[in-house]
Image (tube, rainbow, N blue to C red):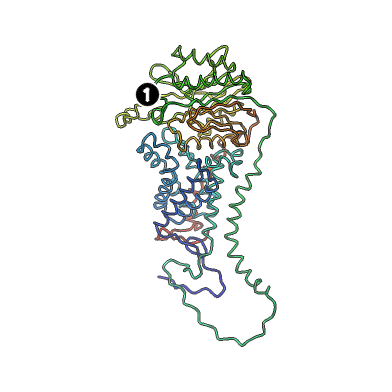
Amino acid sequence: MVQEKTAPPPGAPPAASREGAPGGPRWRDPLGRTAAVAAGGLLLFLAFPPLGFWFLAPLGAALVIRAVHGARPRRAAWLGFAGGLAFLGPGLHWVTPIGVDAWLGLIALESLFYAAWAAGTALVVRLPLWPLWSAALWVAMEWARGTFPFGGFPWARVAFSQGGSVFTPYAALGGAPLVSFAVVLCGGLLALASLRAPGPPGRRGRAGAPPAAPAAAPAPAPPVERLPVRSSARSAALPIALPLALPVALPLAGALAVPAAAFAVPRPGDEGRSVTVGVIQGNVPGRGMTPLGDEPAVVLRNHTGKLHEMARAVREGAMARPDVVVLPENSTDIDPYRSETARAEIDAAVRDVGVPVLVGAVVGVGEKNRATRSLVWDPVTGPGAYYDKQKLVPFGEFTPMQDLVLALFERAGLVGKQSVPGTRDGDLRLGPVTVGAVNCYEVAFDGVVRGTVRTGASPLVVQTNNATYALTGLPAQQLAMSQLRAVEHNRAVVTAAITGISASVTPEGEVVWRTRELVQDMAVLEIPVRTRKTVATRVGALPEWALILVGTAALAAVPVLRRRGSARPVTRSDDQQVGDV
């Protein structure tokens, strides 16, 4: 039985639409929703380096959430998948030097996580305070992406678009997960405000319902003398205007309060210590899948040659004398343990500069394996302590499902020997300081960086070989991760990249020196040494797990509250819901 709709009394506020917005848009058209979620994904991409419009990230999240809101979980999953493709397609385009098929396969796989998030969000938006629950589920989704499969792929987390933004201070409180949560929460509040915004005058309050018949015109009243009191009209409008304005103003105020509260996060100060660090970027002869070129030892000579050049500049007074020098990952393409020539060449260059050097090398482990190693090379005693990379790149440093993959893809054979992961943190004594060695891909993993910082190591040193992806978005995205890590752990970060971007980042996340790509370069930098721990360093993964638990609990609460009548039901039309938010 259809209940007849009566017209509201004159002056009453518009009825709440089935989206929970007073007269707001219903977004019932699936194509419109898909277009909105794709636009949100593109805004998220634009927030990331190299473009770096970080302020677009909350707007992108708002559009994605707004598109998902009101959809049934199955359709929401499709929308989430489409949004993931729109975001990760351009965001991970740097994978194409490996192959377009690898790029398409990666973004399709990773977009499944966004589909799962969207399906969960379609459920939790039926609960009160749903912007909190949807943001918590986003954190859970990014955790899952960074864990499964093959060790995870945490690249393009929302937090990594905020290397230098108003949201960045949250990293010192709860790490990258809290930054992602804050950005998506801000987006959720913006989505809530849009849902509550009044629609155009005369919009129907219920899908499919005819517009209310106009009320009969009242009989003309006799003329009366107008009183010169204008404030009475405004006063009479306030009881109507305030109920309409408050539902929109409150979430907008919350969206502004989230980044504003970041400035209250406690941060350790300067400790008055520093170390002078030389950084060398030697460049490589090749490009793409063969960055080291066809002729062996060219990369080795590029870096030892720059070491000799730095030594001459120091002797001539053109450069300050460094306390230590850092070379990039893969700064030698010849194993110095197995080649006397490589060992002698590195040793001569280190003796010339006269200070300990952190060398990046790929070394043999037995006959079938290898390790990516940060190797301390002393000018007197030669090679000594080392750190082996713990987080390895799937299909780049090791091959999952090796027999199957090698049978299907000839390119997989370029991996060669399989890398084995290290088993210890990256604290290495290098001259007057204990540096925290982090190798390339590892900077995206919270636990690896945090474990090294907890040893007391300072500064952090990120050795990286991103030569295959030169002049793509990857080097800039990786630098933004270093910025976030600096704030998260109160550590300066020195990045030595084989082709760029090499850089120096202060503990406040400011990039004070950086190189161009595909050039040889070097510098001697004064780097602050800090050892005090942030809240994020102390509490570790606790905020992330708390947010994951909150999101999971909200999902579990949906069927319980529906049975009790506290959650909003879904009608036959998957885009219409009743009740307010």
Q: Is residue 534 above or below residue 562?
A: above
Q: Position of residue 174 (x, y in %)?
A: 58, 39
For badge 1, the amino acid type reads Gly
Q: Is residue 230 left or right of residue 545?
A: right
The residue at the point 66 percent across, 44 percent down is 264
Q: Is residue 68 left or right of residue 275?
A: left
Residue located beneath label 1 in the image:
416
Where residue 503 sits, quadrant-wise, is top right
Q: Is residue 175 above or below residue 357?
A: below
Q: Residues within 10 Å of mark 1 (few under 14, many from 20)?
A: some
The residue at the point 48 percent across, 74 percent down is 6
Where residue 318 sits, quadrant-wise, is top right
Residue at the farthest bottom position: 222
Q: Nearer the viewer, residue 364 or 216?
A: 364
Q: Position of residue 568 (x, y in %)?
A: 48, 58
Query: Is residue 429 among what the camera can see?
Result: no
Q: Position of residue 481 (x, y in %)?
A: 53, 36
Q: Is residue 74 left or right of residue 548?
A: left
Q: Is residue 137 above or below residue 379?
A: below
Q: Is residue 122 left or right of residue 249?
A: left
Q: Is residue 243 above or below residue 435?
A: below
Residue at the farthest left position: 407
Where residue 101 sits, quadrant-wise, is top left
Q: Secondary structure at mark 1?
A: loop
Q: Position of residue 344 (x, y in %)?
A: 49, 12
Q: Quadrant of the N terminus?
A: bottom left
Query: Is residue 527 among what the camera can see?
Result: yes
